[in-house]
Image (cartoon, rainbow, N blue to C red):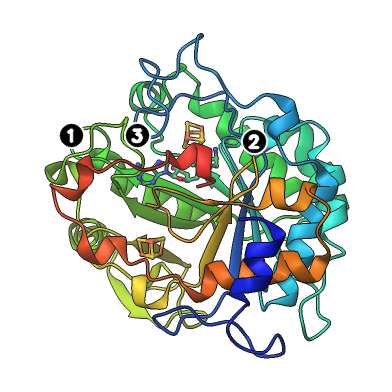
Amino acid sequence: MDGKTVAAAGPGASRDEPVLDRLGRRLHDLRISVTDRCNFRCIYCMPREVYGRDFAFLPRGQVLTFEEIVRLARLFAGEGVEKLRITGGEPLVRRDLPDLIAMLAEVRRIDGGPVDLTLTTNGSALRSLAGALRDAGLGRITVSLDSLDEETFRAMNGVDYPVSKVLDGIAAAREAGFGPIKVNMVVRRGINEASIVPMARWARSEGHILRFIEYMDVGHSNGWRLDEVVPASEIVAAISAEMPLEPIAPNYPGEVADRWAYAGGDGEVGVIASVTAPFCGACTRARISADGQLYTCLFAVKGTDLRDLARSGVTDAELTDAIRVVWSIRADRYSELRSEATADLPRVEMFAMGG
Ligand code: SAM
Ligand code: SF4
Ligand code: SF4
């Protein structure tokens, strides 16, 4: 979209009004991918057979600079975004990431308050970076860990990476002052469902908030099948059999994880049931890929190029109008329409879009 098209289309409503999409959803969260690269090759995300040595990742000139990222974050915050999540690929492989965090920590919400600044990582570089990230103003950290069982985890991350190093990264995050730490575990039938209860036991004893994620048909290279999804209900039942769980209210409207508290106290677990109980109706999330494409759904086929628009010299107001136009015509609700058949449709990979 160029500046002129944007001006002609207009944002629909007055710039003072929060922009709503076609299903009446606000724009509240922004996920920013800072790189499409990763040092892992998780079987459900970047399988090694597809993302081998020859795979062409984005050349540096196509990746947003820190200044470009911060400009977009500021404009999104001006449109009502209150939560920024830094992701990738693996965000910690982006050079000088703490510098970006320090710049983003200055972004203000419409009401003048600081944005909620969070990061999702595979944890492998936390030992060296957690302190600098904390000092830079990062608020919270989520670490992905799919099993405590050595063989299972090494097979799932695709690069034979040991569990102990991720645990050490989590320890480093805690030493740096982060907490409670969230831990994401993707559950795939036949691969790691035996790890559900041990992971719950461990997270409970460590005081981490564990969040189980139903295996999703993101991208098109993981060969997803519906029968490989372990439903949230089954996950909750497995834990409850040993450690009874009670449902608790969401922290805020539209929170994606269903929360469950241990009946005996000591914390909670979350379950993200994107396949068996889709939450599109409350989805207030936009994504910007490392090369500046704006996506309004994790399952999008196409984004809107904000990078070239920004680089063409448009004003902040013009760029804001472009964002408002994209959001105002958004009608995505893929997870509510999902079936075995839709899994074969073309779409952008999660690591490329920003998971
Ligand atoms: N590399 C970082 C990490 O792994 O935490 C951040 C990016 S990763 C794409 C973000 C999250 O998406 C991770 O928690 C990962 O487990 C999850 N994820 C990736 N592929 C998935 C899939 N097919 N289904 C469900 N979750 C997935
Ligand atoms: Fe890398 Fe995260 Fe994808 Fe695993 S889930 S391959 S760590 S981007
Ligand atoms: Fe949001 Fe798209 Fe996921 Fe639905 S499928 S919850 S619209 S990202």
* Disc 3 crowd, CA 10 A, few/some/many (<14, 14-19, 20+): many
| Image vertical order of residue 170 relative to residue 112, above or below | above
SS at mark 1?
loop
Q: Residues within 10 Å of mark 2 (few under 14, many from 20)?
A: many
Ligand 1 closer than 8 Å to the CB at disc 1? no
Residue 28 visible to the viewer: no
Q: Identify which residue is drawn at 65% across, 46% down.
A: 292
Q: Position of residue 110 (x, y in %)?
A: 77, 82
Quadrant position of ligand 1: top left
Q: Nearer the viewer, residue 96 or 13?
A: 13
The residue that label 3 is drawn on is: 44
Q: Which of 241/279 is in front?
A: 279
Q: Does 341 appear above or below 127?
A: below
Q: Nearer the viewer, mark 1 or mark 2?
A: 2
Can you give x and y, in whole percent of width and height, for residue 308 in the image? 70, 45
Q: Which mark is residue 35?
A: 2
- Does 101 sit above or below residue 28? above
| Residue type at tag 3 | Tyr
Which tag, 1 or 2, sits closer to the chain's start?
A: 2
Amino acid type at image mark 1: Gly
- Marks 1 and 2, Cα distance to the nearest angstrom? 31 Å
- Does the image show residue 289? yes
Q: Which residue is identified by label 1?
A: 190
Q: Is residue 170 left or right of residue 202?
A: right
Identify the disc placed on residue 269: none
Q: Residue furthest top?
A: 53
Q: Are marks 2 and 3 in contact (CB under 8 Å)?
A: no
Q: Which residue occupies 50% across, 9% down?
A: 54
Look at label 2 and name its amino acid: Thr
